[in-house]
Image (cartoon, rainbow, N blue to C red):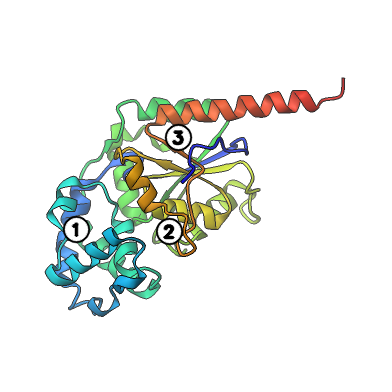
Amino acid sequence: MSILQLPQESPRVLLLDWHGTLVNTRAAMYHALDEVLPQLEALGLLDHLVPPEQSRSSEDARLVAWVRQHRKLHPRIRDDRKISRTDIFEVLFGSDEDAKSRAHAAFDSAYQTHLESVEPMEADAYEQLSALRALGLKLGLISNRRRAFLEAELDGLEGGRWWPLFDTLVCGDDGWRRKPAPDMLLQALVNLGDGDSLLELEGCWYLGDSTTDVVAASEAGVTPVFYNGAGWDQRWLDTIFPGSMRHPHQPKAVVASLAALQALVRQVLAQGLRVSRAQQPR
């Protein structure tokens, strides 16, 4: 897999995932998953688990098999807490939208009992986002979680000072299909346009920490940037982004921090400025 090719489009809009990218909500998330997975049979979801031959990788097939047999996550995955709820449901249910919708609804019901204060993924996250805004970028927040949950977490995060950072918020219960469908990203671009027509796709980047985020960005036609805050090694990146016919979507860049993202944005903006100057008549 060839990642880290410099994105060609200078960013004007930066859409961002919430959980696992900007903030850490993994404790509450995994508590909720612990409640949902034992209910798979009662929810009528056990027969909707992905067959082994349809899994993206042998690792995915083993995860599905473990959940099918034990109705819970493998202890290693549970202890690592690196994989998002959305990615877990993608691995378990694949393209079955109805099954994923029911799983997300059950998750939301469980999550509200574990809702707690959240912490930034990085100590200087607010400053890094402020610096990106200072470069002239519009920022949009995209989250598969309920709006009530997201707004409560924003209220409680560092005294609510993050609210003005974002020019739009699109959430999982706003009436659009959840990621990996492109709907939420496209709606954010409508919100950032004139509220009726779509803002131009060129110049939009989407930063997220999951394969679901990369698929959603690719399907929306915007530049996918993978946030590797979990510290996955290259072997694992090659596994989750195989570039195969069934799973073709890959990020245009990988960053390990918001500081690295800001440096990448500055690099691409500077490159675009040099190209623009070179094209001007002399």
**Residue drawn at point x = 53 percent, y = 58 percent:** 219
Density class for disc 1 (Cα within 10 Å; few <14, some 14-19, many ≥20) is many
**Coordinates of residue 233 in the picture (x, y in percent):** 32, 40
| Amino acid type, label 1 | Ala
Q: Is residue 250 above or below residue 229?
A: below
**Left or right: 71 in relation to 141:** left
Q: In this view, does 54 lie above or below 118?
A: below
**Coordinates of residue 29 in the picture (x, y in percent):** 22, 52
N-terminal of the two: label 3 or label 1?
1
* Residue 238 vs residue 25, the one in the foreground: 238
| Amino acid type, label 3 | Leu
Residue that carries the numbered disc 1 in the rendered image: 32
N-terminal of the two: label 3 or label 2?
3
| Amino acid type, label 2 | Lys
**Residue drawn at point x = 34 percent, y = 49 percent:** 150
Label 2 close to label 1 by CB (< 8 Å): no
Spatial CA span between label 2 and label 1: 19 Å
In the figure, residue 174 lies in which quadrant?
A: bottom left
Spatial CA span between label 3 and label 2: 22 Å
Q: Which of marks 3 and 2 is in front?
A: 2
Residue that carries the numbered disc 2 in the rendered image: 179
Mark 2 residue element? loop
